[in-house]
Amino acid sequence: MTAQPARPERRGPETASVMGVSPFKPSVVKAVFGDVTPLHVSRSAAWAAASVTRTVLTEIIDGARRAAAEEARKKLMPGDLLSAIDRNVELEVGGKWYDHSPTFRGLTGVLYDADGVVVPSPKRSRSRKPSAVVGAHRFEAGVKKLLRGQGVTAVPAMVRDLNGIASVFLTDLARDAAMVVREGGLKRFGTVTLVMSGEPVPPPLKDSFRAPSARRGDGRTIGRDDILAATKIQLFGGALRQRALTEAREATENTSAG
């Protein structure tokens, strides 16, 4: 009797690599980019940005799902989000959202000014200028689809946090992609490898997406490669960065550049 090959471990009912099309529509992506930059966003760039956002949110939800499963729950709570980030620092993205969410209050530390006076948390802006926080609701449908894909639901506060993290992350991705276009390429980037004290340092990850010294394309359009370069800036290294780059490339293989 021949031995059967080992099946790869699946993290949940539906992992990022088998989900196919991102639940975050290109129209939402382009709306976020439009709030940040006047540059045109190519179709392949929109799909790549949607894919990267999906990969990041799927990983966060998976970590929260694991934390909830330890308490035999299928409904995620904000505490599960904190547990997921605490166990995997790669998931600490969308940091600007933390100052606006009660979930993270007290974890970001108390800020003092030069005179030693406590700086209060930022209040909701009444400005009509679009922001990642104000526009977070645009991500709710996609977030709920990702939750269903992993066989879980979430309390409203948790959904709001996931919406906010997705919105801030994509907004930062848009800013970095626009910077790559302005500067004519990604000047430098690195990879941070996380290891526990006393553990051997693993070999460096092979990165097949290293940006050339100068970008291709015109200076008026954000392309797919600009999104990949921005992803390297936003995700500081490790498995999540590599997975996001790989899945973004796969998601755009059959997408036209227009």
Image (tube, helix red, strand yellow):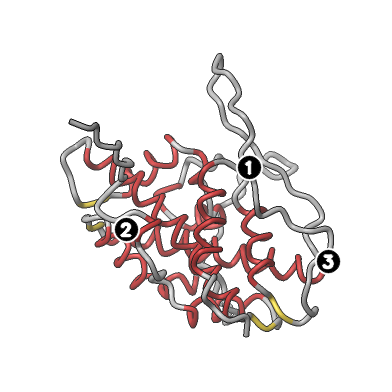
Q: Position of residue 212 (x, y in %)?
A: 79, 59
Number of marks in the rendered image:
3
- Spatial distance from mark 2 to mark 3, Cα to Cα? 39 Å
Q: Quadrant of the C terminus?
A: bottom right
Q: Is residue 164 left or right of residue 4?
A: right
Rate crowding at label 2 as few (under 14), some (14 to 19) or many (20 or more) other CA atoms within 10 Å: some
Q: Quadrant of the N terminus?
A: top left
The relative height of residue 30 versus residue 4 in the rendered view (above or below) is: below
Between marks 2 and 3 in the image, the one whose residue lies nearer the viewer:
3
- Give the residue at x 28% y 46%: 65
- Spatial distance from mark 3 to mark 1, Cα to Cα? 25 Å
Q: Is residue 69 left or right of residue 249?
A: left
Between marks 2 and 1 in the image, the one whose residue lies nearer the viewer:
1
- Give the residue at x 54% y 17%: 199
Q: Position of residue 133 (x, y in %)?
A: 50, 67
Marks 3 and 1, the one that precedes in the sequence:
3
For this orientation, the residue located farthest to the front is 1
Q: Which residue is mark 1?
A: 206
- Residue 183 — which label? 3
Q: Which residue is mark 2?
A: 157
Amino acid carrying mark 3 in the image: Glu
Using the rendered view, name the quadrant where residue 149 is placed: bottom left
Amino acid carrying mark 2 in the image: Ala
Q: Is residue 70 left or right of residue 248?
A: left
- Give the residue at x 45% y 57%: 55
Marks 2 and 3, the one that precedes in the sequence:
2
SS type, badge 1: loop
SS type, badge 2: helix
Amino acid carrying mark 1 in the image: Lys
